[in-house]
Amino acid sequence: MENAQKNPVYPYADLSIECPSKSDRVTAFFRIFCGIPVLFLFLLLVGCNTGKGAAIGGGIVFLPAMLTILFRNKYPKAWFEWNCYLSKFAARIFSYLLLLRDEYPSTDDEQFVKLDLRYPDVSAELHRGLPLFKWFLAIPHYIVLAFLFIAVIIVTIIAWFAILFTGKYPPSMHEFVVAVFRWSLRVNAYAFFLVTDKYPPFKL
């Protein structure tokens, strides 16, 4: 279920969001208000998990997984599955808030947002000490992604007007936004999900 698509560039994490042929103008106009209930639910979910001391700010189980890989050379499957679930739920929410899809985010169904993470063979694929430094090694990606997410906000505003006037999300803009989120996912897969030691590529 968690096997990633056979992407020759980075097979450990992948994301695809189907571009709709037509977007709903009414829900797009009120999208930020429509998304408040599910966003609140997500924040409750993240807050409860973070409050137990098991996760970092995004609710991802990071520190316990890092220590378990370091000292026991294991990655508990339950923690991996939690990270997968939270990532998929977040992807559905932000694809809705950013107008990429019109379907209201489901708490469990995949819908049209396909996010895949590959469970690693820890002993064969992961260096036990590397998780201590991955977050630091990924700093160049954080810098690039900061500028890319500014571009995503600008593109989303333009797309919002395009939807209101034409009823369609411009496919090229849709592809760009999805590519930025795919890049972000691959950085997280390396630095925080700890599913691979392969450094993510600098490409959309």
Image (cartoon, rainbow, N blue to C red):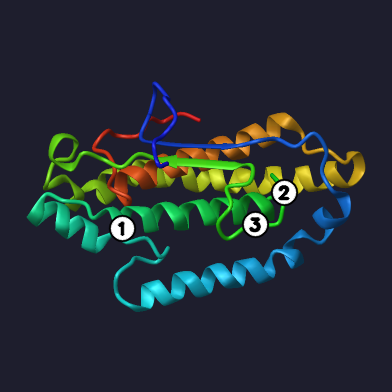
Residue depicted at x 43% and y 76% = 48
Residue 144 seen in this snapshot: no
Residue 20: image location, x then y, percent: 75, 37
Task: Provide the residue designation for mark 3.
Answer: 105
Q: Amino acid at mark 1?
A: Ala
Residue 194: x and y in percent read 27, 47
Whether residue 68 is visible here, answered yes or no, is: yes
Earlier sequence position, callout 2 versus callout 1: 1
State the image coordinates of residue 98 (x, y, percent, origin top left).
Answer: 68, 51
Residue 106 found in image quarter: bottom right
Label 2 crowd bin: few (<14), some (14–19), many (20+), radius 10 Å: many
Residue type highlighted by circle 3: Pro
**Front one among 59 and 76:** 76
Tell which circle, 2 or 3, labels the residue nearer the N-terminal end: 2
Compared to residue 106, the image places residue 173 above or below, namely above
Question: In screen coordinates, is 199 left or right of 46?
Answer: left
